[in-house]
């Protein structure tokens, strides 16, 4: 066992101020609620808190097509009527609307995941958390499922500079299709997604038979579940599969997407998972038990958010899981904080149990487990890879200083580092505080 984990936590208050629209289920405000709950439990005192840099367009284009990144950079609610054909081409519309500060929102959440990966690569922390990240549906050339930039793919690409193999685990109720698709043909990333699967359920992919192709054959693992799965069934299946995956694949780092829409009572979900189920003889069960289990492998770990549409439960979940990563058990009674009214009247961390009928029979789950373990037997044990020279971390775009407005020459990232926001961290200086440029 390594000594106490060093944890880096990324947050920018601006990420929670964007607004997808009045009837849209995605509410980035849940990130402010999460952060204030983390502060109210004083978890910030046990971590290093960083504001992420805003990812440069050229960094986003490490995965996304340059024309798509440029489109996101240019479009605004006031100008979208000029982009008729391109809106359809890049799949912006009802699910993925154009809103104020869309591109900056993408830059912040993607910058957080990229920075998290870089701190892990440079061994400046053991675990890195970016609850604003985890937008797993975005594709190379288009938005999808409320996701515009796939920060997870960008973070994994960073980790691959230092690690021959990276394991991606997804416990969102929706299939992690964008990440799977990005690495479908390689054995350097194994993707494992636990999700609801059905013809009428977004995104409609994630069948057990989707296992990867060419060099990536057997390196995509899908665990398609039916409505109503409960804590015990989910965590038993999760532990069995993930333990075998780690033993077989021997990853150098793990990325864990903790979508909270797999919780009971989610507006868009259909599972019965609690945040942290009752203590049984076999141990704790629930969404956060998956986080606890992955942490035990003592590998560099990048943890992100994802889906989650009952926002007070999202905040509860990710706060509890921050505690899990810090080995800190939280009292059930929520301390006073700016958003306490959202947690009324109980003001507790626990959420009601789900009452959706569990359609996952024991025989169905046994069949899935058997087929996944069979696939794992087919892979080359810990595939080798020819490592290349490590590319530089920061891709700073070239610009002509003479053409810049003199008032804008200090880039936003530099200005941000000089500002301490009221709603972020802040009881004294962090002992180990470093500018992200030092990473």
Image (cartoon, grey):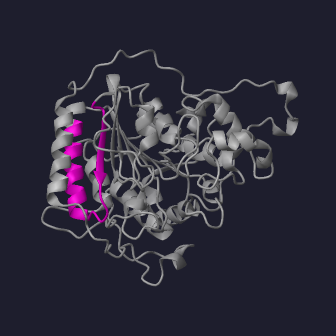
User: Taking 354 as reference, is 212 above or below it?
Assistant: above
User: Is 420 on the left or on the right of 235, as rendered?
Assistant: right
User: Magenta span covers which residues?
Assistant: 218-246
Q: Quadrant of the N terminus?
A: top left
Q: Inspect the magenta stretch and tell me whether residue 144 lies in it.
A: no
Residue 124 is at least partly visible in this image? no
> Which residue lies at the image location 57% right of the left edge and 38% below the top edge?
436
Q: For the view shown, which residue lies furthest in the bottom direction? A: 345
Q: Is residue 179 left or right of residue 371?
A: right
**Foreground pick, 207 / 259:** 207
Residue at 32% from the left image edge and 44% from the top image edge = 207
Q: Where does residue 149 sit, x and y in percent of width and height?
A: 57, 41
Camera-side residue of 106 and 181: 181
* Total residue callouts: 0
Q: Is residue 220 above or below residue 385?
A: below
Left/right placement of residue 46 relative to residue 221 reads right
Residue found at the far front of this picture = 199
Q: Could you say which quadrant of the image residue 358 lies in?
A: bottom left
For image coordinates 41% across by 59% down, the residue present is 260
On the image, the x and y values in percent for residue 194 come to 32, 50
Q: Looking at the image, is 341 positioned above or below residue 283? A: below
x then y, percent, for residue 362: 15, 59
The reply to whether residue 156 is in sight is yes
The image quadrant that residue 254 belongs to is top left
Asked if residue 232 lies in the magenta stretch, the reply is: yes
**Residue 80 placed where, x, y %?**
76, 48
């Amino acid at each position: 066992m390594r000594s106490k984990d060093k944890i880096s936590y990324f947050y920018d208050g601006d990420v929670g101020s964007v607004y997808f629209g009045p009837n849209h289920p995605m509410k980035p405000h849940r990130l402010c609620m999460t952060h204030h709950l983390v502060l109210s439990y004083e978890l910030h005192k046990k971590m290093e808190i960083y504001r992420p840099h805003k990812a440069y367009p050229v960094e986003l284009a490490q995965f996304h097509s340059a024309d798509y990144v440029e489109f996101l950079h240019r479009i605004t609610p006031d100008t979208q009527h000029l982009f008729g054909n391109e809106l359809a081409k890049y799949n912006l519309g009802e699910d993925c609307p154009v809103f104020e500060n869309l591109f900056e929102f993408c830059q912040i959440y993607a910058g957080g995941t990229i920075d998290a990966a870089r701190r892990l690569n440079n061994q400046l922390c053991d675990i890195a958390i970016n609850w604003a990240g985890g937008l797993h549906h975005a594709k190379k050339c288009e938005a999808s499922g409320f996701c515009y930039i796939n920060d997870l793919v960008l973070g994994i690409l960073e980790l691959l500079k230092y690690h021959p193999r990276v394991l991606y685990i997804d416990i969102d109720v929706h299939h992690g299709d964008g990440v799977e698709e990005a690495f479908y043909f390689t054995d350097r990333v194994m993707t494992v997604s636990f999700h609801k699967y059905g013809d009428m359920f977004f995104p409609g992919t994630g069948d057990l038979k989707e296992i990867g192709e060419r060099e990536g054959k057997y390196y995509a693992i899908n665990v398609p579940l039916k409505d109503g799965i409960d804590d015990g069934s989910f965590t038993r299946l999760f532990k069995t599969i993930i333990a075998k995956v780690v033993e077989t694949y021997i990853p150098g780092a793990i990325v864990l997407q903790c979508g909270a829409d797999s919780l009971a009572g989610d507006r868009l979900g259909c599972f019965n998972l609690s945040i942290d189920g009752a203590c049984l003889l076999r141990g704790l069960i629930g969404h956060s038990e998956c986080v606890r289990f992955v942490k035990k492998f003592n590998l560099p770990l990048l943890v992100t958010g994802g889906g989650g549409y009952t926002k007070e439960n999202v905040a509860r979940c990710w706060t509890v899981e921050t505690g899990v990563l810090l080995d800190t058990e939280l009292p059930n009674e929520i301390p006073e904080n700016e958003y306490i009214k959202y947690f009324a009247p109980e003001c507790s961390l626990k959420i009601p149990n789900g009452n959706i009928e569990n359609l996952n029979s024991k025989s169905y789950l046994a069949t899935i487990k058997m087929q996944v373990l069979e696939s794992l037997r087919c892979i080359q044990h810990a595939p080798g890879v020819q490592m290349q020279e490590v590319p530089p971390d920061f891709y700073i775009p070239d610009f002509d200083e003479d053409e810049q407005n003199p008032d804008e020459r200090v880039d936003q990232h530099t200005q941000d580092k000089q500002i301490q926001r009221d709603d972020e961290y802040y009881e004294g200086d962090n002992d180990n505080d470093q500018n992200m440029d030092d990473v």
